[in-house]
Each structure stands twice: as structure tokens, then as C-alpha cells.
Image: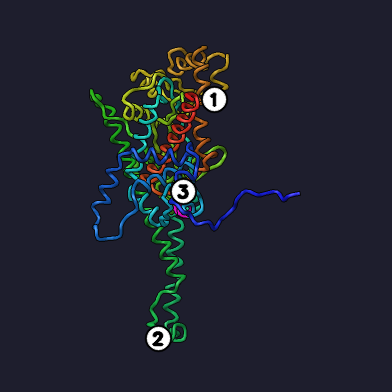
Amino acid sequence: MADKLYRPWSPDQVFLLPPSMRAWLPEDHLVHFVMDVVAGLDLSSIERVLQQKDHRGERPWNPRMMVALLFYGYCLGVRSSRRLEKATYEDVAFRLLTGDAQPDHSSIAEFRKAHLTALSSLFLDILRLCEKAGMVKLGRVALDGTKMKANASKHKAMSYLRMKQREAELQAEIAAMLAEAGATDAEEDALHGRDKRGDELPSELRRRQDRLKKIQEARETLEAEAKAARAAELAEREQSKQVPPENPPAPELPSHQVRHDAAGNPAEDAQRNFTDSDSRIMKSGKDFVQAYNAQAVVDEGEQVIVATGLTNQASDAQHLPAMLAAIEGNLGTRPVQTLADAGYYSADNAARCERLGTDALISIAREKHVLDDGPSPWPTGDPRAAMHENLRSVTGAAAYRRRKCIVEPVFGQIKEARGIRRFLLRGLQNVRGEWNLICLTHNLLKLFRFTQRSAFAAA
């Protein structure tokens, strides 16, 4: 019997004709889609910065290649610059995308840092591509937030009370060490050797002084923030007494306000993190994490994110006005219906939605309680009573049950499917840019799958 023949295998084969790298992967692969989308984006703001550099210096990497590399990496949950560099050697899709070039991790990290604002603004470009494809209807949207971990440990946070205590302890330790050093001046030659001046600070003392300096800086910053929060509080009270303007400015996202007393001093349990000072300890499920509050408004049809926001303010209610304004700013219109959980309810928010002409279904209690058939716990005339009746109506109950099917899967897709559970960058503005990049690539994936379904249906 003749031996069975095997398929050809020639790993050392030299190509006789130049191969097409596009042929390395199927035509419907995500990497082709990302490259085609990036090819049509306006990157003039990035190119303008690059062109301003001295032309005699080292040539930069092609900005479209770098943008496509970041987009594709974020789509897959590969965000580390070192992992991206490694992928350009080992992953066929990444090698195709970069044209078999390997930008080093420093170049990738510097590109993201230098052009984060421009990359963040591309969220609107991708959103409009989704709108043009017919994926955005703004008939019904759902708003929600998720606590996304900061690139910092909660164990690196310290309360105002502990700062004052630790500051006093370190000052006492430093004073004791200095006194001990003064008492041993006669032994310096033996301790330090003849080639030393004898006045160098011991490493232990330097560490304590550095620690003391960091704590003092954090305490002073916390005190300044508390005074600023008190001043803003007083200004808001005065403003509330005045007649509101006919054309009020667009609402802004809230920011964390340091809890303080009437004199503007920080509360003793007010905290500040030494690694990422803008992040805050927030409750997430049953645990407390060092985090930011990442907000998203999701359109019902294809789960496209139509507005984003990110703050260091833990509670959700203050975000609703700015998020509604962001929808209109992005798409030029308002949603017909807005769904939100109990964290967003306030009488002001309900009234604002009514003025804007969007039918708001905002829970005033946990879903299993707000949708039951029991009597309303709120008296007639209370704004919550009217909202409760809307939620318990046949159409209202059916619509509100859609909330968790619209927005909550989006956070699951980001955190579980793509593995993005913690920010890489630090500082509020940087993290906002990264959240936009995460949401942008979520929409890019939705657009990719939508076009695939459309192509299949047309075939």
C-alpha cells in the first residue's frame, strides 16, 4: 500500500512573487474593517501636530497606522503599549495592520498620550458613521453608569484625619533622628569614612522626609479643594436666589466636592489617593474600589453609545442633565424616551426631561418594588407619585423593563467580553479620553457586526 501523502509544508520557502498581506486573513476580518474606517477619518488635528516638528528629526510613524493600531487593540481589549508592540511581532492581524512594521512600546504610549484629545474626539466621527448606517434612531435610549477601577490602589488613599496624624508622627520621627545624628557627630568619621563630608542624610531619614512632603502636599490640596467647594456652595446659593437667565448655559458634568464644614475645612474622613489624586473610593456592588464613574447613553436598536461622560462623582443623579445635553450636542436632536434607574431620580431631573420633551421613565425604587401592583407610597401631588403611575402603566412597565436589556449589556461587553475593567491612564482628563476611546471602539465593533449582517442579508 502506498504511503498517505501530506499537504505541502515549507516554512523556509522563499516567496518568488511579492505577496499581498491583505490575503493573509479573510476579507470579512475585523482588521480589514478597522483599516478601511480609519482610512476615511479626518486626522488633520494629529497630522498638524506632527508636521510642526522639526523635519530633520527622526521620522514619525504614519498616524493612520498608529490610530488603526490603537483602535484594533482596544477592540480586542489589548491596550498596553508593550502588549501592542508584542502583537506586531506575533499576531498576523497586527502584522497586517502595521505593514509588518513594529513600532516600539514607547512610541505607541507617547502617540496615545500626545494625541489623546484628538483620539477622543473621533468618538463623534464613529457615532455619525453608525447614524449614517441607520443604527441610531433615538426613539428610546437608556442611561446608566458603571464604576470603573482607576489605575491606583484604594490602599494608597489616606483620610484627612490620618494625614494630620501621620504628619505629626513623621515630624516627631524626623526630629528624633536629627537629634540622634547631632549626638553622634563625634563618631562621624567612623560612621561615614574620611571620604564623606559627614553631613549626608541617612537614607531612612530621606524616606521619611519624602513621605512627609507627599502627605503635606496632599493635605494642603485637600484643604484648598474643601475651601473651593465651600465657595462654590455659597455661590450656588446666591445664584438660586436670582432670576434664571432666558438662555442658561449647557449643563456640565459634576465633579467630586470635598465634604467640608461651614468654615471650609475638610471633613476628617475626606480622602485623597497618592497614586491618582483625581480618583475616588466608590461603592461597586458589595465592595469599595478606587474608581471613576463612567457614564453612557445607549440607543435601543443596536446598542450604540450615543453619549459618554466620566467623573469622579459617585452618585448618578447629577449626571443626567449633562448626558441629555451631550446627546443633543452629538446628534442634533433629543431622544423620544429616556430610561434610567433609581440612582438618577430627582424632581429636578424629571422636570428637566419634561421641559426637553423627552418621555422620562426614571425609577424611584428598585425595579421589583416600583413595578409591583401595591399602592403608591407617595401622596397625590408628589412628583414621585406621578412617576410611579407612569412606571406602573402597561406601556410604562413594558418600556422600563427594556432598560436593563439596552444599557447593562454594553458594560458587560466592555468589561467581560473585552476584559476592560480598569483604566490604564491616570488623571480625570486622561481617563475621560480613555473612556471615549473605549466607547468609540465599542461602537466600531457594533458597526462592524451590523455591516456583516447587512452583507449576509443582501447576499
Question: Answer yes or no: do the residues labelled 3 and 2 have beta carbons within 8 Å?
Answer: no
Magenta stretch bounds: 80-85
Which label sits on residue 94?
Answer: 3
**Residue assigned mark 1:** 366
| Closer to viewer: mark 3 or mark 1 | 3
Q: What's the amino acid at mark 3?
A: Phe
Determine whether the residue tagged by mark 3 lies in a helix, strand or loop. Answer: helix
| x and y, in percent, of residue 264 in the image | 34, 44
Crowd band around label 2 with a 10 angstrom C-alpha radius: few (<14), some (14–19), many (20+): few
Label 1 element class: loop
Tag in front: 3 or 2? 3
Nearest the eye: 324 or 99 = 99
* Earlier residue among tags 1 and 2: 2
Q: Nearer the viewer, residue 12 or 258?
A: 12
Which residue is disc 2 drawn over?
Answer: 195
Q: Is residue 441 visible?
A: yes
**Image marks 3 and 1: residues in contact by CB distance under 8 Å:** no
Q: Residues within 10 Å of mark 1 (few under 14, many from 20)?
A: few
Q: Amino acid at mark 2?
A: Asp
Up-down relation of residue 424 to residue 198 (above or below):
above
